[in-house]
Image (cartoon, grey):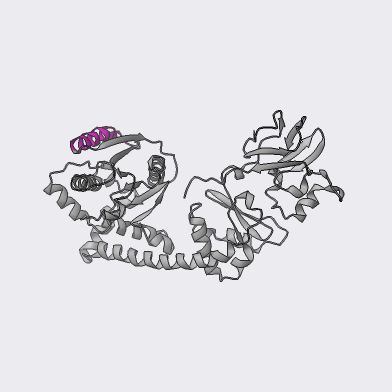
Amino acid sequence: MINLTPWLNAPAWHIAFSGGLDSTVLLHLLADYARHHATPPLHAIHIHHGLQPAADSWPAHCRSVCERLGIELTIIHVQVAPGASLEQAARDARYTAFKQVLGPGEILFTGQHREDQAETLLFRLLRGAGLRGLAAMPEQRPLGQGCLVRPLLATSRQQLHDYAQAHRLEWIEDPSNTDTDFDRNYLRGEVFPLLQQRWPQASANMARCAEHLSEAQGLLDELAQDDLAKAQAGAVLPWLALDSLDLAALITLSPARQRNALQYWLGRRTRLPDSRHWAGWEGLRDAAADAQPIWRLADGRLMRSHGRIWWLSGDWLQMPGAGLAWAAPDSALTLPGNGCVRLLATEPADNLRIAYRQGGEVLDIPGRGRRDLKRLLNELQVPHFVRPRLPLLYRGERLLAVANLPELAQADCQLHWLPPTNAQGLS
């Protein structure tokens, strides 16, 4: 029924085990395969969302099934954030938990089947999704440090039911699955039975359609990679370790190719905007040369500076804390919300402190005299969003050095700054 060969070299296998029909069959298939082949260690994960009283008995059922199969089980309780879509919030909580479990290269198997794929396609079509959304669920995709794999996508729910009955498996029937107030349940319980009365192969054909759309999306991804290759070159100030693209290279592309390239580039960094919100990109692209436009997205923002667009997330979305006195300059100093600094000096120094720009700073430059710091940063093309968090080294009231810019420091006193990571919540 499934081919597991591609994942035999993974460090470990995990299965998302809800106790329902799909995951019960998948768990049984994996356990049976592991008995007859050399496989990675197999481990089951049950996520308890706490959304309905009936769910309180499910962990015990899952534990009983796993004990009979000799499989270790972890039960994780999650908090589902309130919001407009309970389905989406529960999914977000579930996959956040899975990401935390997966180690490097490990596999998480989930039990979505052919009808799930067809429902996903129709659901996204009704929401006006683009090609990337209509490609529905891939057989595998990155998840945290590992990989999510759906080995049952070509298998029908009837095949799973027949397998479960033939092997006398017991599973949980989630009462919420009959609640047609949930969109997917409505499609499953009300819409698909009508479609399949008229077109018995509707689910199979729609799942095949999703495969075709996925192949087309793959070709667009290859085009995006080619278009991004030139735009990613020429990054300034590599010590920033920030992702950026050359705006001029993007503008040479047609609007559709611009969006395609950005969708590919942003897809690994944030949840993508739908078509109604791409005006943010147009505003960023078309703003005046001296403007400082911002495109705010779900998990970060794009900013424009010195002919490039920059992706900022994590600590970069907040201003750093106040400056600090540096009592022990022979060791690194951690800056709240702003990485850390280290002093490279030929002689010991005292009365040092780290501060940030307030405006009006001047710096003595050998051979050039006292120069305005703002003009110096302009000359070096330091992005405007970096300047408020660029550490400045003072002795008393005298500015000695600007971090990571040897041109703006005394010859015997260099300040090395390790900026904060550009971390974000999604991949």
**In the depicted structure, whether residue 264 falls above or below residue 170:** below
Q: What's the magenta region?
A: 52-68
Using the rendered image of the protein, determine whether residue 136 is visible from the camera's viewpoint. Answer: yes
Percent x, y of residue 384: 70, 51
Residue pictured at 20% horizontal, 63% vertical: 197
The main secondary structure of the magenta stretch is helix
Q: Residue furthest front?
A: 346
Percent x, y of residue 107: 34, 47
Residue pictured at 56% horizontal, 71% vertical: 254
Give the left or right position of residue 418, taking residue 75 as reference: right
Residue pictured at 23% horizontal, 42% vertical: 173
Give the left or right position of residue 36, taking residue 234 as reference: left
Give the left or right position of residue 193, taking residue 364 as reference: left
**In the depicted structure, whether residue 168 falls above or below residue 129:** above
Q: Is residue 328 magenta?
A: no
Percent x, y of residue 134: 39, 62
Q: Is residue 61 magenta?
A: yes
Percent x, y of residue 361: 81, 43
Residue pictured at 32% horizontal, 44% vertical: 12
